[in-house]
Image: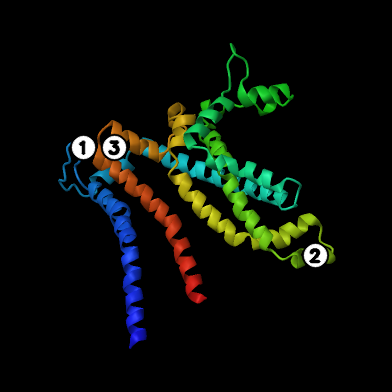
Amino acid sequence: MSKIRNTTRDKLLSWALLAPSILIIAVFVYGFIAFTGFASVTRWATLVPDFTFVGTTNYSRVLGDSRFRIDIVNIVEFSVVFILFCLALGFFLAVLVDQHVVGENMFRAIYLLPLAVSPIVTGVVWRWLMSPGNEATGPQGLNALFDSAGLGFLKNGWFTDENFGIKAVAIAAGWQMAGYAMALYLANLRNIPDELREAARLDGASEFAVYQRVIVPLMRPVTVSIVVVLGQVALNVFGLVLALSGRGVGFSSDVPAILLFDTAYRSGLVGRGAAIATILFLLVAVLVVPYLARMLRQETAR
């Protein structure tokens, strides 16, 4: 009887400790998500709230907006370049660090440093690096470096180029987040038994083949995790774009988050801005929910 009483007391104590966190998350996360969804179906178009129900009118106007369609294309292009750049650079850096080089801790810290930099600061720095220059100033930033190194063919208009604007932003974002991919890849590389690599080498596999046939396949689960996290980062990118290129030439580097800001806060169309936010939330959910469901199934199977 005493054992049952102690178990009940422990459960009540656990719930009492968790209750404040649960309440805060319920109100400030799920409550605000629900309120945004509610606002998206209202006529709220001024500073004064107007909760008149208008159904899917705001969604129809957003989906019919040519700028929103441009932004969707931009964010897809940004996500692909950004994620591939992070995966490639992160894996390359992880392989380098995994060689147990002298000063490994220093290199690891250097590669992770960009993660601590604000997206706004990253945008300002890369805006200078990617400034193409003009006839009066000559090449600047990266273009000046390429010119002095005899690599003039690599010079680019960067974010001022209508066809390259969003890709330039993706490169800057990839520089900032590659350290995250490196950290996860490195942790998994260190967990791969050396016996597997040695067995492959004894079978005559070259070092490249060892990575291609053994290491890379074992990296697939962590690669999926990285893609999911970077995917939601890409869909919500805002500060970096605003600081680096803004909306770009002909909205060439515009993204849905900037459109949301312009719609809800600059134009005061709160209901329509809430519709954009809801669409972004659904896009993130499409990416994250299947991953979480898969992880839950794996945990249950264990």
Q: Residues within 10 Å of mark 3 (few under 14, many from 20)?
A: many
Q: Nearer the viewer, residue 24 or 140?
A: 24
Q: Nearer the viewer, mark 2 or mark 3?
A: 2
The residue where tag 1 is placed is: 45
Q: Secondary structure at mark 3?
A: helix
Which is more toward the observer, 57 or 165? 165
Horizontal side, residue 69 vs residue 191: left or right: left
Residue 245 seen? no
Q: Residue at x 42, y 56 (%)?
A: 286
Rendered residue at 29%/44% (across/down): 274
Q: Earlier in the sequence, mark 2 or mark 3?
A: 2
The image shows residue 238, relative to residue 226, as above or below, that is above
Disc tally is 3
Against 172, residue 208 (above or below) is below
How has the structure been colored for display? rainbow
Residue annotated with mark 2: 198
